[in-house]
Amino acid sequence: MTSEQDSDKAGATGARVRRVSLALTLLFGPGLTPIAGCMKKTDEPAGLRDPAPKFETKSLDGEDVSLADYEGQVVLLNTWATWCDPCVRELPELARMHEELKHKGFTVIGLNTDVRSKLPAVRTMVVHHKLPFPVWLDFESKAQVVFKLRGYPTSFLIDRAGNIRWKREGEIVKNDAELGAILETVLAE
């Protein structure tokens, strides 16, 4: 195959992906965005103070879990999927934060949004990254509706009273300054 043929084939594939994405968006609307790909980083201002939605699901171990179980703690709820590269890249930073701050009443909860058939991949990823925090499963995509998710990863910082204080649509990077600042404030309250 010539390089010109390779180029034509790559162009056709890209055009096909764009057509499928457009068709899915037109068919299902913007609610499909989390399925279509990972998010560009956007932050909501600190001090939102909206009550976190009631949310119940299953843990990786099959136990019933609820955000209400964490009242009195500061929680970073992180929605992620195994196919999302930024989600995977941020896992070590989330693990580090959880370990460094758990003695202050802080926990990370990883809310995995993959389909049930991906459960073995989720378990492998948890073991591979040695995730020290709870991992919850959302096979029914309830979080997409309840938290109005537009993409992955999306993280919510929830204070001890159960209010959302910060939201990030996109990757949490190592030593994230903005998250560090709001986290320091919320942990001191």
Image (cartoon, rainbow, N blue to C red):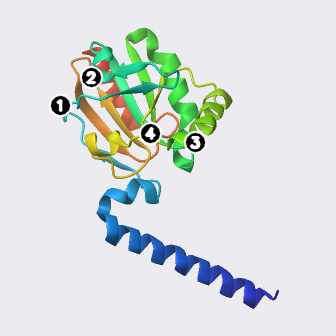
Alpha-carbon neighbours of circle 2 within 10 Å: few (<14), some, or many (≥20)? many
* In this view, the mark in front (1 or 3): 3
In contact (CB < 8 Å): disc 2 and disc 1 = yes
Residue under label 4, please give it.
139
x 21%, y 18%: residue = 161
Residue nearest the observer in this picture, 115 or 167: 115
Q: Nearer the viewer, mark 4 or mark 2?
A: 4
- Crowding around mark 4 (Cα neighbors within 10 Å: few <14, some 14 to 19, many 20+) is some
Image vertical order of residue 15 relative to residue 163, above or below: below
Asked if marks 4 and 3 touch (Cβ < 8 Å), the reply is no
Query: Which badge, 4 or 2, comes first in the chain's sequence?
Result: 4
C-alpha distance separating marks 4 and 3: 9 Å
In whole angstroms, how far apart are the C-alphas of marks 1 and 3?
Answer: 34 Å
Residue identifier under label 3: 118
Q: Residue drawn 61% across and 83% down?
A: 11
- The number of callouts visible is 4
Q: Position of residue 55 (x, y in %)?
A: 29, 29
- Apparent side of residue 40 relative to residue 68 in the rendered image (left or right): right
Residue at left 54%, top 78%? 16
> In the image, which disc is placed on residue 49?
1
Which residue is tagged 2?
159
How far from the left and from the top, in percent, is residue 103?
A: 44, 9
Residue 181 % position (x, y): 34, 30
Residue 63, image quadrant: top left
Q: Label 4 amino acid?
A: Phe
Say what secondary structure mark 1 lies in.
loop
Real-space Cα distance between discs 2 and 1? 8 Å
Instruction: Give, as a three-letter code, the residue at label 1.
Output: Arg
